[in-house]
Image: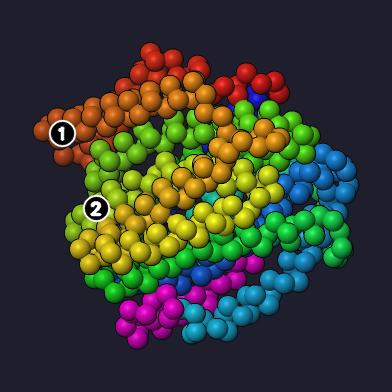
């Protein structure tokens, strides 16, 4: 278990660096392009390669690859696992050129599906940008397998640091390439490609040190390939229906006032900050351990480490939600309200953020629960849960958009996340013959209650501190970091006095 905490710490450190650069990227984009027509077109263009990346590269492919690779390492050894990885890489290198060519060729057909509310000129710009960005999916597909190999060896730092290179690429596109082009927004698209190359290349030295060498080979009947296919298809469908949420949101937002899509995007960036920093870090570190424990038939450790993940996810996301509710407006003004990003954009983005935050903890647990089902070889359950969640999202989108505009889309997204989490939790709680179900014991219940109380205290003190500090200063930096320090200190003090820092996670009693 000590190794798990080391892995989580490394991922959080690397992800923190990445998120800092990600926020810097968003600040620069907001300053250069604002929340208007140009950035709306870029977001529509970026959606499809990003969708395929989440679906195929970092989504279903990684979810299917890592358990199989980890199992081969445990049972058959390093050489056989290496053959399997080389096999997958070779197949992808043969398939991705055709996928990229299709994406470039058929851009005029698929882009209007997402932005039917765009004017003709804006739609043409989105199509052009999509063609520039689409090769990114090939880079991310290969990078995802390299990440999977490193995760199989429980090496997490460089894969977690790789997004820093992506953010630097996008920043270079916005700052240095965009001003030199007749269409500056195309500089941002080129920055995506530069960032994708960096995200791939940074992982190669770590693989080399592990002794991995790429050797092209195609073994279509390798047992690992068969298992990946079996795991991947339900995962593809499940992740696809989850991405439909975003597609539907953007399509409906394209009919709202200009800048609605951008407001959703900027609010989602802040919403994803604690998710990416903590929830994804926790599930990423735990996933290979879950797969390894199952391969060794150590079911008690599987259950304990999953319970640990639940406790830790709740422990960090509830106070994060409280802090963002208290300081969301101040944070958005500090980060984005510069250049072409106006006070009106800030108000609209804050309103969207507040409704997204309702689903923060549930989405964090969805990350963890989904990984647990993939490790168990049961991807159909996340498929069922995400399919129902999409239906909930679509229904509430149409019910709420008229009265609440973009905020209604955010609320629908939050509600669908709560439904998804509830369904996954229901199945994980069911007793199983191998005892791999979640066990919500006295310690977990007690400490979740203490986390809720501590988070409420955090919100109250942070909100009051922000109001009092605003009497004496208008400095946005002070108005963010002053209340933030007070709220964080109060939460940590409560956690210490209540004892949840010691006994929140029963799995900590395990050995290595």
Describe residue 454's horizontal placement relative to residue 2 as left or right.
Answer: left
Residue 118 forms part of the magenta stretch: yes
Task: Report the span colored magenta.
Answer: 112-140
Describe residue 15's horizontal placement relative to residue 69 as left or right.
Answer: left
Disc 2 or 1, which lies upstream in sequence?
A: 2
Name which residue lies at 64% across and 67% down.
138
Q: Can you tell which quarter of the image residue 256 is in?
A: bottom left
Could you say where residue 420 lies in the image, as x and y percent from the top left?
Answer: 47, 50
User: Image height check: is 24 above or below 446?
Assistant: below
Reading the image, the residue beneath label 2 is 351
Label 2 SS: helix
Name which residue lies at 40% across and 59% down.
392
- Residue 467, numbered circle: 1
Residue 23 forms part of the magenta stretch: no
Describe residue 299's horizontal placement relative to residue 503 as left or right.
Answer: right
Instruction: Tell me which secondary structure the magenta stretch mostly adopts.
Output: helix
């Amino acid at each position: 278990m000590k190794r798990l905490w080391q892995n989580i710490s490394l991922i959080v450190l690397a992800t923190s660096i990445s998120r800092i650069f990600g926020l810097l990227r968003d600040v620069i984009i907001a300053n250069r392009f604002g929340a208007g027509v140009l950035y709306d077109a870029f977001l529509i263009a970026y959606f499809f390669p990003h969708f395929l990346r989440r679906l195929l590269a970092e989504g279903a492919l990684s979810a299917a690859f890592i358990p199989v690779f980890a199992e081969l390492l445990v049972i058959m050894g390093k050489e056989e696992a290496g053959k399997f990885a080389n096999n997958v890489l070779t197949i992808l290198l043969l398939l991705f050129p055709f996928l990229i060519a299709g994406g470039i060729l058929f851009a005029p057909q698929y882009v209007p599906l997402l932005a039917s509310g765009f004017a003709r000129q804006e739609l043409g710009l989105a199509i052009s940008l999509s063609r520039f960005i689409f090769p990114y999916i090939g880079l991310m597909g290969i990078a995802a397998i390299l990440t999977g190999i490193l995760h199989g060896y429980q090496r997490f730092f460089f894969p977690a640091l790789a997004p820093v290179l992506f953010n630097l690429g996008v920043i270079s596109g916005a700052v240095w390439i965009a001003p030199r082009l007749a269409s500056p927004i195309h500089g941002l698209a080129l920055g995506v490609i530069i960032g994708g190359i960096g995200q791939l290349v940074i992982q190669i030295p770590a693989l080399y040190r592990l002794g991995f060498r790429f050797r092209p080979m195609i073994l279509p009947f390798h047992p690992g390939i068969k298992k990946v296919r079996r795991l991947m298809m339900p995962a593809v469908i499940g992740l696809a229906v989850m991405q439909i949420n975003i597609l539907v949101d953007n399509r409906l937002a394209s009919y709202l006032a200009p800048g609605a899509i951008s407001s959703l995007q900027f609010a989602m960036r802040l919403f994803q900050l604690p998710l990416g920093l903590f929830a994804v870090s926790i599930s990423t570190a735990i996933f290979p351990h879950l797969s390894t424990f199952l391969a060794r038939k150590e079911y008690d450790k599987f259950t304990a480490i999953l319970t640990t993940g639940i406790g830790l996810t709740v422990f960090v996301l509830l106070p994060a939600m409280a802090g963002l509710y208290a300081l969301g407006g101040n944070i958005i003004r500090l980060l984005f309200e510069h250049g072409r990003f106006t006070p009106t954009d800030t108000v609209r983005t804050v309103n969207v953020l507040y409704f997204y935050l309702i689903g923060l903890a549930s989405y964090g647990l969805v990350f963890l629960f989904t990984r647990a089902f993939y490790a168990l070889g049961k991807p159909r359950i996340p498929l069922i849960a995400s399919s129902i969640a999409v239906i909930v999202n679509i229904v509430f989108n149409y019910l709420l958009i008229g009265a609440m505009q973009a905020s209604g889309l955010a609320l629908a997204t939050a509600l669908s996340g709560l439904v998804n989490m509830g369904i996954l939790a229901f199945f994980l709680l069911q007793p199983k013959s191998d005892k791999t179900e979640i066990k919500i014991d006295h310690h977990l219940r007690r400490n979740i209650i203490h986390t809720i109380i501590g988070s409420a205290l955090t919100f109250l003190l942070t909100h009051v501190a922000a109001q009092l500090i605003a009497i004496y200063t208008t400095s946005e930096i002070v108005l963010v970091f002053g209340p933030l320090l007070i709220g964080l200190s109060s939460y940590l003090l409560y956690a210490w006095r209540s004892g949840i820092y010691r006994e929140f996670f029963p799995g900590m009693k395990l050995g290595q």
